[in-house]
Every structure is written in C-alpha cells, then in structure tokens.
Amino acid sequence: MATLINPYKDVHKGIRKLLNDTLLLMGQTDFNDAEFVTNLRHQVTQLHDLLELHSDIENRLLAPVIYEAGGESEIALIESTHERLDGILTGLISDLENLLPSDDSAARGYQLYVAYSDYVGEQMQHMREEETLIWPIISSQCSDQQMIEFQIQARQMTPPPVMRTLLMAMIAAINPFERKLMLGNMQKVLTAEAFQNICNLAQSVLSKSDWHHLSQQLGFASADLQGTRALN
C-alpha cells in the first residue's frame, strides 16, 4: 500500500522560497519609511496565513494517519512546533504593526530582521523533521489513491489568494522535471481557462528560457500563451 506521492516535497520547496524571499525583503526594507514597512508587513502576513493553513491541513488530513500508525510522539512534536512557530510569527507581525518611523526605527527594524532570520532557521528545521520523521510513516501507510484524495481535499481547503501565492512559489522553486509533472497533471484535469490561469502564473515567475522549455514539454505551439494550442 506504500505511496511515492510526497505531500511535502513541492509544497516545502515553495515555502522555503517564500521564507527566504521575505528574509531578503526584510533585509532591504528601510524601516524609517512607512510605505516600505507596510509592504513588508503585508508580505509577512501573507506568509503567516499560508503557513497557518498549511499546518491546519496537515493536522486535519495527515495527523489521523500518523496516529493510527502509532506515531503519537511524532505528531505531538509537530503540533507543538506549529503552535510555537505560529506564536513567533504572530509576534513579529504585531511588532511590525507597532513600528512607526522614529529615531530608533532602523535599530528596531534590524532586531526584527535578526529575529525573523532565527525564525526562518527554525522553520527550515521543522520542515526537515516533517520530511524525515513524518513522511516515512505516511509513505508506508497510504496508497497512491489516498494521497491523491488528500491533495484534492487540501486544494479545496485553500482559498484562491493563498493558492495563488503558493503555486507561484512552488512553480519557481521546483526543478524542470517536477514543473513539467505538476503542470502536465493540471493540464489533464483542469478546464482550458483554469489551466491558462496556471500558465499565466508560471510565465510570470519563470525566466523566458525556462518558460519556453516548459511550454515545449507541454506541447504548446510557442512560448506565447495566446497561441498555445493546448488551450484551444
């Protein structure tokens, strides 16, 4: 009954990209500029919403499988880590909301940057624990069909704005083979309009050469979406 469909691989690649992108933005932010701080707070809030939903999906869909397999201690570790990390990020958002331009804004902003950097390190370690402790249990307990059903439920639980953010990050973060597999599967099941929306996202985050290569793999007439035969 073992499955090779890994619920963490592509999603975690996307999350790692978002974590690092946000760290880069925080390092570039002028904390004396209210508009810069507002933009940063918006991005951190988006990240929080995605991670909160990701944790909820794991708790609701995957935790029962782990419990049934006798992995109570592993689930307890993961759930406590989810709660602790959520508290850290919520606190950082609150600090950003209260950060007004002042003489010490730059110093306080740098402190937030260092704190967020620590948070990123902890999130990276947490995802590694899920990939090394939880994934082996899931892979041994679930069939391919079960994992496909989990993926469908996870998509249904994800609001469109959050899904858009995650998809853009995943498409940019995964390798060409994984990208072809992901979009190729979508091409089989989505309507032409829905699939074109996915292609628009892909084209917006990929280099011209990467998009051209992907469009050829998927059987498009050219890299220009408007002329894509696959969508006609």
Image (tube, rainbow, N blue to C red):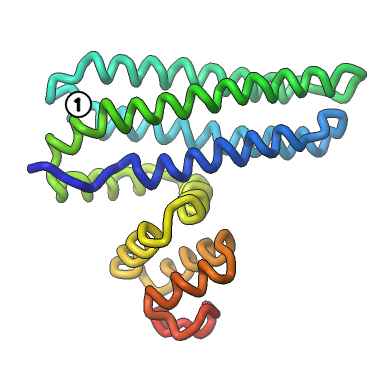
| Image quarter in which the N terminus is found | top left
What's the residue at 82%, 29% (across, down)?
31
Local crowd at mark 1 within 10 Å, few (<14), some, or many (≥20)?
many
Residue 183 in the image: state x and y as whole percent. 38, 64
Of all residues, the one furthest to the left in this rendering is 1
For image coordinates 11% across by 42% down, the residue present is: 2
The residue sitting at 53% across, 43% down in the picture is: 17
As drawn, is 200 to the left or to the right of 125?
right
Residue shown at 54% from the left, 27% from the top = 120
Q: Is residue 106 left or right of residue 192?
A: right
The answer to whether residue 172 is above or below residue 213 is above
Task: Locate the C terminus by quadrant.
Answer: bottom left
Q: Closer to the camera, 146 or 7?
A: 7
Image quadrant assignment for residue 127? top left
Question: Residue 160: in sight, yes or no?
Answer: no
Could you tell me residue 80's position as x and y percent?
Answer: 38, 15
Image coordinates of residue 213 in percent, x first then y, are 46, 72
Q: Say if 69 sits above or below 149 in the image.
A: above
Q: Is residue 198 left or right of residue 39?
A: left
Residue linked to disc 1: 66
Q: Position of residue 123 (x, y in %)?
A: 48, 26
Secondary element at tag 1? helix
Say if 201 sits above or below 121 in the image: below
Could you tell whether 133 is left or right of 107 in the image? Answer: left
Numbered disc total: 1
Amino acid type indicated by mark 1: Ile
Q: Quadrant of residue 95?
A: top right
From where the camera sits, is residue 185 visible? yes
